[in-house]
Image (cartoon, grey):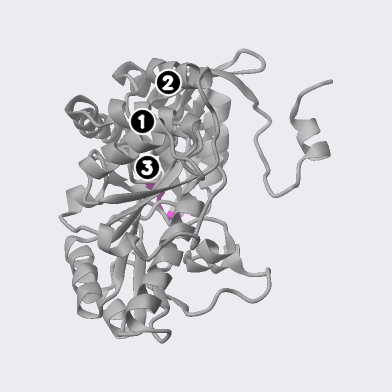
Amino acid sequence: MTINRELFDQVMVPNYSPSAVIPVKGEGARVWDQNDKEYIDFAGGIAVNCLGHCHPALVAALKEQGEKIWHLSNVMTNEPALRLAKKLTDATFADKVYFANSGAEANEAALKLARRWALDKFGEHKSQIIAFNKGFHGRTFFTVTVGGQAAYSDGFGPKPGDVVHSDYNDLAALEALISDNTCAVMMEPLQGEGGIISPEADFVKGVRELCDKHNALLIFDEVQTGVGRTGDLYAYQGLGVTPDILTTAKALGGGFPIGAMITTTEIAKHLKIGTHGSTYGGNPLACAVAEAALDTVNTPEVLNGVKAKEALFRELLNEINEKHQVFSEIRGKGLLLGGVLNDKYQGKAKEFLVEGINQGVMSLVAGANVVRFTPSLVIPDADIREGMARFEAAVAKVVANNA
């Protein structure tokens, strides 16, 4: 059997259009393809591989747990899940944890909990969910409807009801929408897919105040921002605003599928026995790997290192931009950064990604106008410099192609 890009078209549903490059091996911030060509990974599996590839702590946890027990039903609990839950509650505002397999599942749980909380406490009238335009919360039908990009939710029939959207960083617009019928406001504390957009301090504090005024829950989707990505363990800790419910996934497992919803005891009690569940959520294998990832990231060395590496990324991106004039700004926080393309390169973010792969560096896009970088939180500075040298070669090529 020949394993190549053509086989994808034969056997896979065509909702993805992957690169012709098929990676087969990774170590740290470097990846090798089938032809043994090396790439520097500034993509991190879309902010997932928080410790790079094959980090010894994760590999050890996987091997150790893999020889003990992989799966139990939720008729029983397990030690890795309990240890991980205790560490998550110790490190955050939360008292209680619900485990799932992905960010979308964690968000689905958060939204169902918010609706159930409002129904139990206030009645059926209090069901409105407010989210933000350009936001992204997953691809289940409920989460994609709450996400603020209609193109992702259109074309599948009637959508879940009582979901409305407001503009991010526009407090007046939210104030006009919110009412005592609102059960929850859901937001990313830094919009990822929507273009790497940071919240203004007054906006995020104002959202919290409006939720309090109208007895609505504030849900922070920290699927992309969580577990060290912004330089804090969770982004809310750097904003001085505490949500009622927080979702975490992606980096939580360092590459192994896991998600979690965390909240307070008072809110959690509304997901009583039988109201929600997951076959694989909280399985021992995922929780053992996630525990190792959390333990490794949640240290002053790694979290402070993220802030230092952000400074190096910005410095090198600005140097590239001085020469080639492609970005209008570099925005984001920590190692969730976006190079916003200027007027001359509107709509061409994918060209930078594709040419980067040709030059041996992996990046991402966040919409058509932003080149996104979400590397390992522990990427060595030497790899940042080498990757940026390759990225500069890609930028030069795109500039030449568009001259």
Q: CA distance from mark 2 to mark 1?
A: 8 Å
* In the displayed structure image, the side of residue 296 where residue 132 appears, left or right: right
Vertical arrangement, residue 140 with respect to residue 382, above or below? below
Magenta segment boundaries in residue numbering: 338-343
The answer to whether residue 377 is above or below residue 401 is above
Residue 387 belongs to the span the image colors magenta: no
**Label 3 or label 1, whichever comes before in sequence order:** 1
Report the side of 266 relative to 387 (left or right). Answer: left
Q: Taking 402 as reference, is 193 left or right?
A: left
Q: State how far apart marks 3 and 1 are (Cα).
A: 43 Å
Q: Quadrant of residue 388?
A: top left
Residue 347, given in percent of the width and then of the height, sits at: 52, 53
Q: In the rendered image, which residue does mark 1 sit on?
A: 291
Circles 2 and 3, Cβ within 8 Å, touching? The answer is no
Q: Describe the element under mark 1 as helix, strand or loop.
A: helix
Which sits earlier in the primary sequence, circle 2 or circle 1?
Answer: 2
Query: What residue is shown at x 56% (from left), y 29% (from top)?
Result: 357
- In the picture, the disc for residue 325 is 3
Q: Residue at x 54, y 28 (%)?
A: 70
Q: State the CA–CA distance, disc 2 to disc 3.
A: 45 Å
Q: Nearer the viewer, mark 3 or mark 1?
A: 1
Verify CB contact (< 8 Å) between mark 3 and mark 1.
no
Occupied quadrant, residue 210:
bottom left
Q: Nearer the viewer, residue 214 or 300?
A: 214
